[in-house]
Image (spheres, helix red, strand yellow):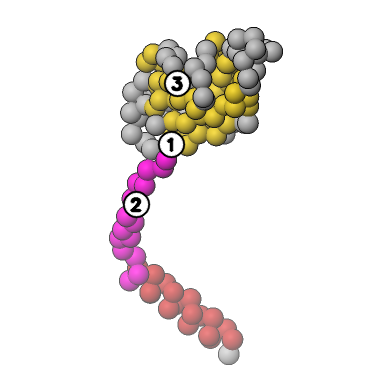
């Protein structure tokens, strides 16, 4: 009895398989991500230079570049910026369009700065007698 049912099931599957074969259409939509900046809390002081880790994640997919700004109550001097791809990220390292200029500390050229990039921004010590200044970063 079980043998007869098993043979019937196998015969059904063999006959039905070609009838269900066909074309499967899958539609995918590209949804661009965002431009996001994260940084560790940091304060510029007169005592010494400060190195601030900043992560820029450009998931927009358009390659138009970005501008990194420092939000501070005074003009600061940026002495260096180091960049590397974040762990696990496939990125295009940013190429500078221009150097620091006032609140703008970096402009990534078109076609660069895509993916997740870890930066280390070094801000020079403030002049002696200057009050400490909190640092925050934005990108657009």
Would you identify the image quadrant in which residue 80 lies? Answer: top right
> In the image, what residue occupies the spot 64% across and 9% down?
128
Magenta portion: prevailing SS class: loop
Would you identify the image quadrant in which residue 140 lies? Answer: top left
**Where is 49 relative to 43, above or below?**
above
Marks 1 & 3, CB-CB < 8 Å contact: no
> How many residues crowd mark 1 within 10 Å: few (<14), some (14–19), many (20+)?
some
Q: Quick one: SS at disc 3?
A: loop
Assign the N terminus to one quadrant of the image: bottom right
Q: Is residue 51 magenta?
A: no
Which residue matches tag 1? 35
Label 3 or label 2, whichever comes before in sequence order: 2
Magenta residues, start to end: 19-35
Q: Which mark is residue 28?
A: 2
> In the image, what residue occupies the spot 33% across and 28% down?
64
Which residue matches tag 3? 103
> How many residues crowd mark 2 within 10 Å: few (<14), some (14–19), many (20+)?
few
Label 2 or label 1, whichever comes before in sequence order: 2
> In the image, what residue occupies the spot 63% across and 31% down?
41
Give left or right: position of 17 versus 8. left
Q: Is residue 28 magenta?
A: yes
Label 1 or label 3, whichever comes before in sequence order: 1
């Amino acid at each position: 009895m079980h043998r007869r049912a098993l043979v019937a099931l196998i015969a059904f599957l063999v006959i039905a398989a070609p009838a269900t074969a066909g074309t499967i259409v899958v539609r995918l939509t590209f949804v661009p991500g965002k431009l996001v900046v994260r940084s560790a809390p940091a304060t510029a002081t007169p005592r010494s230079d400060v190195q601030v880790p900043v992560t820029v994640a450009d998931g927009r997919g358009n390659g138009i570049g970005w501008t990194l700004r420092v939000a501070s109550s005074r003009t600061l001097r940026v002495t260096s910026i180091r960049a590397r791809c974040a762990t696990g990220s496939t990125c295009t390292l940013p190429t500078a369009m221009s150097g620091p200029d006032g609140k703008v500390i970096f402009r990534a050229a078109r076609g660069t700065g895509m993916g997740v990039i870890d930066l280390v921004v070094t801000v020079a010590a403030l002049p002696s007698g200057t009050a400490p200044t909190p640092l925050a970063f934005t990108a657009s």
